[in-house]
Image (spheres, coloured by chain):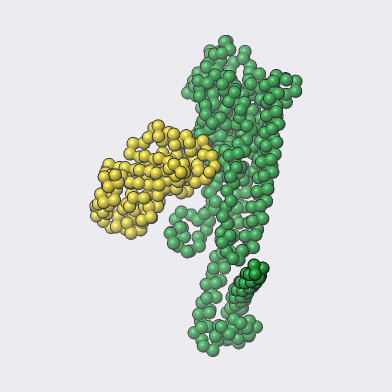
Amino acid sequence: MAALPKRIIKETERLVSDPVPGITAIPKEDNLRHFEVFIDGPSSSPYAGGHFSLELFLPDDYPMCAPKVRFLTKIYHPNIDKLGRICLDVLKDNWSPALQIRTILLSIQALLGAPNPDDPLANDVAEDWKKDEKKAIETAQSWTKQYASAKLQE
Amino acid sequence: MNLVVRYEENVDGGFLAPYGTYRSNLDYNTEIVRNLIIDRRLSPFYTPLQDFDESWTDDELLIILSQLSLHSIETAYSDAEEEDDVDNHKIHKSTNYYKRQEQKAKLQSLVARVKDIQKEEENRYLEEKMRLKKQIQIQVSPDIPSRDLLRKLYRNATECPICFLYYPKYLNVSRCCLQPICTECFVQIKRLDPHPPHDDSSNEPGSEELPHTLISEAASCPYCASPDFGVTYDPPRLISTGINGSIKAGNYIEPFQSIPEDAVTSSPGSGTNVQPSVAIDEMRVMKKGAKNGKRRASLAADAPGVITVDMIRPDWEQKLISARNKLARKAATASAIHASNLIINEEEDDPSNSPRRRRFSAPMARETSSNRSRPGTNSAANHLRTVEERMIEEALRLSLIDEEERKKKVDAEERKKNQSN
């Protein structure tokens, strides 16, 4: 394996020494570009109380291209499909090398707090969301309880 | 070859080629960038420090600096991993495959040559540094930076917010939000490859549709996302060494008695008198200067002095045009195939004109088509037919090759058997 760029080493160190509340990111031992991530659902969202598992990978071109992030926990969200892929501008064309692992994970946490059914990835969820928002939020809450409760993972 | 860091090619203590932090995206126009650096319009490629601590003494700092190489050869060129070509798993390799392989081999030999030259350069640099250490002053090349120059440059090193490496504080600044960026990161930033607009229907997952058009937007500022990213550079006023400089890098002596350059803009009262405190003093002045000193406002992308990402990659327009042409060709082929399918379907409805017969007797097919009384469509139908014929010929050719290959294999196996017997 190629030597890890200084930037990745420093970012990892700073993630450990100065963690973001509600977010953990730990590199895997066999590949330091591969992170195991947990994000807590924002308290004012249907995902409150949820403890979501994600994986994050830093491609060779990082930081010139965005990290690859995917939800591993099942989640009912208009911008996250059933494979866990996330529709978020900063993960695609709006990526900037001045962003970091930390900021990307914060953006994902913010996306949980502000679902955007007008730019959907999971079309069925987005439609439910537009048709009957109350019901959709209830579904999201029950999925959170069922798949993302912290106790379940321990 | 312009990517080799040569120690003679230095400007104000930096160089004309990148240190090698990044392995890819080195497709910027090296000639343009070299000239911009020589003209002091872009910060030179300084050798970065992996770490920096303000509490280091000058001696500690200089020891660390003296151990740095010109280029990070090992990490930059070490494992250029063998990329898997899609055609590696196919029996019939396209002509493009051979072209790609040829290009890859060319690139590899080029990389190997650059690596060799860089190594030679590194050794010469090392020898010169050894001479400097042994105080054989007369023989030392004047291109080896003096201790004063190194101290002056790196004493207040700043971190580039993108690569997290430490550089002399004379970095480029974004034209819009005045954030620092080292030249090595700057040359990495470029337009996205031509792509369909975000709301194009071809973006839908699973859509086979061809995009209607391709666009390529100018790169935005990585810090504030303003469009048309560009930087400006203020060369240090008291350092002017190397190419087009007033003295050689080795002859630089810090002008202790004069006023530090930062003081010119801010408090004139903070003169320097005692040598050891110069660094500390200057640091204070610097901090003050950042707060009180004249802070230039944001500049427009076309303002004089602004270097944009398109300026160092002037071929972007050509790339966009060729990508669009490629798309147009693809679309034309797709509609031709689509149209010919329609005609075949029509013909299949007509039992007297079996397409199978026509396929294997091309001249006859032309006859039948001319016999048909469908005015106006004849020439078009003929054209489509020839396209179709070509496709069939190609299929036949491929299956013949297949058969030959199979025979060869059988032969080879039999030979093997005979030999082992």
- The colour assigned to chain A within the rendered structure: yellow
Residue B236 is at least partly visible in this image: no
Q: Quadrant of the N terminus of chain B?
A: top right
* Along the viewing direction, whichever of B31 and B59 lies nearer the viewer: B59
Residue A49 location (% of width, % of height): 26, 44
In the displayed structure, B266 sits above or below A141; it is above
In the displayed structure, B211 sits above or below B374; it is above
* Residue at 55% in and 65% down: B331
Residue A17 is at least partly visible in this image: yes
Which quadrant holds residue B97?
A: bottom right
* Residue at 75% in and 23% down: B139
Which quadrant holds residue B206?
A: bottom left
* Along the viewing direction, whichever of B36 and A121 lies nearer the viewer: A121
Chain letter for green, please. Answer: B
Residue B175 location (% of width, % of height): 53, 35
* Residue at 59% in and 23% down: B63
